[in-house]
Image (cartoon, rainbow, N blue to C red):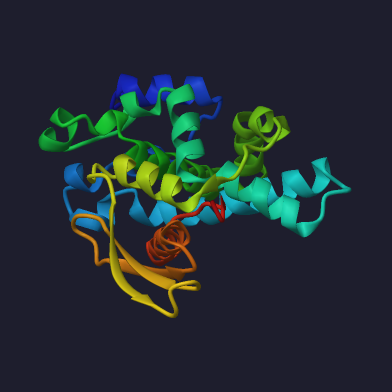
Amino acid sequence: MTRRPKRTEALERRIGYDFRDKALLDRALTHISAAKRGRADSYQRLEFLGDHVLGLVVSDMLFRAYPKADEGELSRRLADLVRQETCAEVARAIDLGAAVRLGASESNSGGRRRTAILADVCESLIGAVFLDGGYPAAAEFVERLWLERMLKPPRPLRDAKTVLQEWAQAQGLPTPSYREVERTGPHHKPEFRVAVDVAELVPAEGSGRSKRAAEQAAAAAMLVREGVKAEFSDG
């Protein structure tokens, strides 16, 4: 009989779920840098599934917990609860980083503490629980880890520039920089067009009646293009 790695046994105890399919759990914890056959052996497909299962379970939780909330409030609460940073917080709470399988270079560069990796593995674990035990098991798993967070007052909305800066830092990218591209209109009523630059990414542009408004619009445009799940104020 093959002995299960202690890291996965300990994780199952921490999360209160015992996998029937241990190979499924292994795949949920395997970063592409440690996958023998590339993406097929990594957590990426499970992450996709878990992302949508998480959204459904949390949406149901919110719908039942806040019967007087309109769709706008529910959407804002949902966005906060499924955002990358929240998933990473949950991952840290169950010490998920200790169980992740990483390649040597990724491990040596601090991958076990990286927000993006922790959030991805958290979602892949949800997807694995869903496949292994069905929706009831996945719902119980999510409710146990998200209920306390759901009942807290919602975080105040942050402006798009702040969200973009935090996201860039979580990806290991430098701080975004802004540059004026064009100024049009009369002196008393100008229109600004600003571009935001982030290393390794294509610049994004936004327009506004002030440089600040244009910068916020450019940051929002980049966040939407990069698929960052967050709600933000107009600044």
Q: Residue furthest left?
A: 105
Q: At which x and y percent is residue 234? A: 56, 56
**Which is nearer the eye, 2 or 37?**
37
Could you tell whether 108 is left or right of 225 in the image?
left
- The image shows residue 180 at horizontal and vertical percentages of 29, 65
x and y percent of residue 102 in the render? 21, 36
Q: Is residue 165 visible?
A: yes
Residue at left 79%, top 49%? 63
Question: Residue 187 appears in which quarter of the rendering?
Answer: bottom left
Residue 9 at x, y = what percent?
40, 22
At 34% from the left edge and 28% from the top edge, which residue is drawn? 97
The foreground one among 20 and 137 is 137
The relative height of residue 100 versus residue 225 in the rendered view (above or below) is: above
Q: Residue furthest right?
A: 68
The residue positioned 42% from the left and 52% from the top of the image is 46
133 lies left or right of 164: right
